[in-house]
Amino acid sequence: MSRLTEMEAFATVVEEGGFTDAARKMGISKSAVSKHISALESRLGARLLSRTTRRVNPTEIGLAYYDRASRILNDAGEADALVVALHAQPSGLLQVSAASDFGIHELSPLLSDFLAEYPDITVNLELSDQTMDLIAEGFDLAIRVGELRDSSLRARKLLEFPMRLVASPEYLSLHGTPEKPVDLEAHKLLSASTRPGANIWRLTDTTGAVRQVAATGGLSVNDGQSLLNAAVAGLGIAYLPEFLFREAVEFDLLRDAMPSLPEQMQPVYAVYPPGRFTQPKVRAFIDFLVHQLSQPPKNKL
C-alpha cells in the first residue's frame, strides 16, 4: 500500500469531513478509504481521526500531520503537472505585465519571433510602472526591473543591464563633468518619475559604497523617452538604462557624465504566481526570454 495513497486518503477525509464523501471524491469504496486510514494510523502508531455520529475530525496530532501532508501532496501534484506540461503544446492567452520602458524598447521587439515560434499562443501585454497584483489582476507573469520585494511570487532572473549618468556634450561643456556622486549636487538632474520618494539615485562608487543622490533641480517626467529627449536637449544629467541611450551615444548626442563611476547594473526578472511555471505557455515564454536576453548588447561610453 502506497504511503502517498494513505496520505491522500487521510487528507481527503479531513477536507470532506467523512469517509463517504472522501470515497466519492477519490473514486474508491468507503471500505478502501477506511483501510488506508487504518494502515496509516497503524504505521504511525498514532490516532489521527476522531469520529462522531455526524463528522470525522482530525485529532491534534492529525491536524499537524494534515498540514505537512497537504503540502507534500500539493508538491507531488505540481511535479506531475510539470511532466505533463513539458509534453504539452503551449497554447492559449498569455497575460503579461511589464515595466513601460523595458517593455517598449526590449520586450516588444521580441514578440514577433515568439508568436512565430508559438502560433497557438496569444499575448496580451500591458505596460505599466505600477506594481500589479498578478493574481487579482489575472496576469500569468510580469517582467519587473530592479530588486524584488514580493516574496510570495516565484522569480527567474532574465538579465542585468547597465545604467549610466549621461548628458549632452553641450551641457557638459557649459557645466563641467562631475567626478564623484557628491558633485552632482551642483548640477541639474533629470529624474525619471514624478512619484514622491522615487527620485533617489543609488550609485555605487569606486570604493563599493552606495551613495544616495536626490535627483532635483531639473525636469521630472514618468516616461523614459521624454527623459532621454530632455538630456539630449541639454537640460541636465539623466540616469538612464543602456537600452535607452545606446543610439544617442553612437551619434554623440549623449556622453558619459561621470566616467569614473563604475557601471551600475540593474536586474530584470520574470515573476509569476506559484504553480504558473508548470503551464506550457508561461514556461515557453520565460525560456524564450532567457534565451533572447541572456546576452544583451554592451555599450561602452
Image (cartoon, helix red, strand yellow):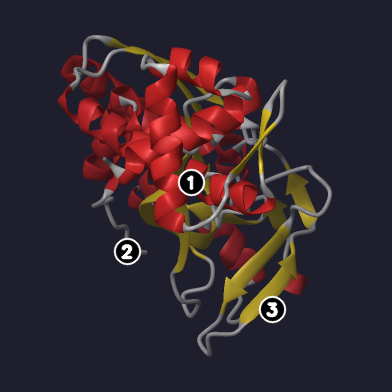
- For image coordinates 63% across by 36% down, the residue present is 129
In this image, 27 relative to 22: left or right? left
Residue contact between numbered discs 2 and 1, judged by CB atoms under 8 Å:
no
Quarter in which the N terminus is drawn: top left
Residue under the image location 28 percent in, 50 percent down: 296
The kind of residue tagged 3 is Asp
Q: CA distance from mark 2 to mark 3?
A: 23 Å
Judging from the image, what secondary structure is the residue with disc 3 in? helix
**Residue 175's spot in the image, x, y percent?**
66, 68
- How many numbered dots are placed on residues in this image? 3
Q: CA distance from mark 2 to mark 1?
A: 54 Å
Q: Residue reaching furthest right?
A: 196
Q: Quick one: quadrant of the C terminus? A: bottom left
- Above or below — where is 217 with respect to 270? below
**Disc on the earlier residue, 2 or 3:** 3
Q: Is residue 214 above or below residue 72?
A: below
Locate residue 6: give its quadrant. top left
Viewer-proximal residue, 69 or 201?
A: 69
Element on which disc 1 rests: helix
Q: Name the N-terminal-most of marks 2 and 1.
A: 1
Q: Around disc 1, counting alpha carbons within 10 Å, would you say few (fewer than 14), some (14 to 19), or many (20 or more)?
A: some
- Type of amino acid at the residue the image marks with label 2: Lys
- Which mark is nearer the camera, 1 or 3? 1
Mark 2 highlights which residue? Answer: 300
Residue pictured at 60% horizontal, 84% vertical: 209
Task: Please rate how many residues cluster around mark 3, counting C-alpha atoms within 10 Å: few if below 14, some from 14 to 19, many from 20.
Answer: few
Residue where numbered disc 1 is placed? 69
| Pointer 1 with pointer 3, Cβ within 8 A | no
**Label located before the other in sequence (1 or 3):** 1
**Residue designated by label 3:** 183
Q: In the drawing, does residue 225 fall left or right of residue 245?
A: right
Is 164 left, or right, of 1 in this rendering? Answer: right
